[in-house]
Structure formats: structure tokens, C-alpha cells
Amino acid sequence: MEGAVSAPGLIELQGVGKSFRDGRLRILHDISFSVALGEFICLVGPSGCGKTTLLRMISGLITPDEGAVLVKGQPPRPSAEMAMVFQSARLLPWRTVAGNIEFVLTLKGLPRSDAAMRARALLGTVGLRDFAEAYPHELSGGMQQRVGLARALAVEPEVLLMDEPFAALDAMTRETLRGEVLRLWARRRMAVVFVTHDIDEAILLSQRIVLLGPRPGRIDSIVTVDLPEPRWQHDPRGLAEFARLRRELWDRINAMSREGAVLEELARAFPDTEALPSGR
């Protein structure tokens, strides 16, 4: 395990904190790390620790209450250079599957004919070539999510933010799309911040794993993943290093779960007192 990394990067989080409900619900506390151009980072931690909130702050959809979030040295704002894949697809219901992808490509200035060609190629990549003229309501939830992923990948963004994009997919499709994301990342070398609850997925995909503790989310540790590349060609799950990382992460997560249970008991016993920090 390693401490937080503070070196400058394409994305920088500096002492970030966030609360909701007029400050009564503290979600994040003192988050600091950076993501370099071409780096793949996974955020892992228990439900409610603020992983999605962090993604939304990096995207510029919400702002921190404390500290700073910077992309290229400036507060972030939604742009064509940044794409986000949410837990739900959020497709435009009045556009076809192909039309949803063509829309973002034309916004970036691609001619309509080129946009249509690239949209259909991407639909082939995610296994939906035959559904190009279907509408979102005609697709299953998993199929809609594949369209959302194709739409994000279409613009080849400099920053790609992904919030458990494969959670609704079957195992075979997850494996295929993980490989496609890794191939695109290796070719485009964008910065990727990927939220997952799946430890194996985090190790398979990332170069570093940011492990967050229970709410209020704070960095417990940052783990470097040093496995052979390219991982879509050489499955690392049989390697001793993969097993070691998996065991190390699970041991720490289990320890945090026990610590979190103790803090919940303290909060119930002393409801008017701010929850004690975990000491990490």
C-alpha cells in the first residue's frame, strides 16, 4: 500500500471535502490525489463513501465545499474533451441508438456522414450493430448501457469518467467491453477514472487503485498495480501478483468494514456528537 500521490497531473484533487443537507451529511473529507494524462485510476470503497460524488466533481457537475478540483489547472466544466458514463445510460429517448452516438460526434464537428459511419462501427464493437435504428425504450437496461459506453468512447475524450458502467451487463459482455476500453485507452492514452465495487475488475483495469474508507470518504491508501501489459491479450488473473493484490485489498476492505461498524455504534450511542475519524 502507498500513501496519497500529490504530484501535478492532468486532474488534481487538493484537500477536497463535500457535504449535503446543509452540511449535516458529510460525504468526503480531505481527498488529495492526481491523475496523469494516460493514467487509468480505479476508485474502490464501500457504498456511500463518495465515489460517484468525486466523479461528478471532476466532471464539473458539482463543486467541492472545501479544497479544489482542477483539470489542466482550471476548475472543470463539461466539455467535449471530457466524457462520463453513468450507472444508467441516460440516452436521448427521441433519437435512435445510432442517432444518440451521431449526436455527440456532430457536436464535436464531425460531418454527418462520417459520424454515421463511426457510430455504426462503435455499435459493432459493443455488439449492437443490428440495433442501430432501434429506440432506447426498445432495448434492455444492459443494452442501453452499452450504447451509453459507445457514445462516450465515440468522441475519444481526453478524460473519461466511468461510474460502474459494466454493473448491469452479463459476464461475457463485461469481459468484452473491458478489453475494448483497455484497447482504446492504450491507443488514445486518455486519463480514466473508473468507479467499481469489483476488486478483480479494479486490478484488471487500473494502474493505480484509490481505496476510500467509509463515509465520510477519505483516502485509506493508494495501491500501484504492476501487471504485464497489454492485459486484454494476457489475462493476469492467474499470476501470483494478481492474487497478492486481491488478498491485500480484501483484507483492508474487511478491516475498514469492521471499523465502520464500530463508528456506526458510536454514532447511535452519541447522536449529537460528530462521528469520530477512523484515524486513517
Image (cartoon, rainbow, N blue to C red):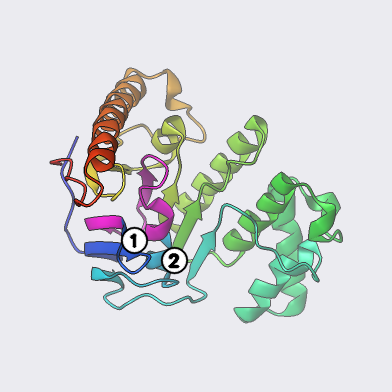
Q: Is residue 257 left or right of residue 61?
A: left
Residue at 43 percent of width and 68 percent of height: 59
Q: Which quadrant is home to the C terminus?
A: top left
Packing grade of label 1 (10 A; few <14, some 14-19, many >=20) is some
Q: Return the residue at label 1.
A: 37
Q: Is residue 29 magenta?
A: yes
Name the quadrant containing residue 92.
bottom right
Task: For residue 235, say whether it is visible.
Answer: yes
Q: Type of residue at label 2?
A: Glu
Q: Which quadrant is home to the N terminus?
A: top left
Residue 62 screen position, x and y as percent? 41, 71
Residue at 52 percent of width and 52 percent of height: 184
Packing grade of label 2 (10 A; few <14, some 14-19, many >=20) is some
Q: Is residue 208 above or below residue 262?
A: below
Q: Earlier in the sequence, mark 2 or mark 1?
A: 1
Closer to the camera, 127 or 148?
148
Task: For residue 9, say whether it is visible.
Answer: no
Q: Which mark is residue 158?
A: 2
Residue contact between numbered discs 2 and 1, judged by CB atoms under 8 Å: yes
Residue at 36 percent of width and 41 percent of height: 45
Q: Is residue 161 magenta?
A: no
Residue 97 screen position, x and y as percent? 78, 61
Q: Which mark is residue 274?
A: none
Q: Is residue 134 left or right of residue 189?
A: right
Residue 257 screen position, x and y as percent? 31, 31
Question: The magenta stretch spans which residues?
Answer: 27-54
Q: Is residue 59 above or below residue 129?
A: below
Q: Is residue 193 above or below residue 269?
A: below
Counting the numbered discs, the total is 2
State the separation of the CA atoms marked 2 and 1. 8 Å
Residue at 38 percent of width and 49 percent of height: 40
Q: Type of residue at label 1?
A: Leu
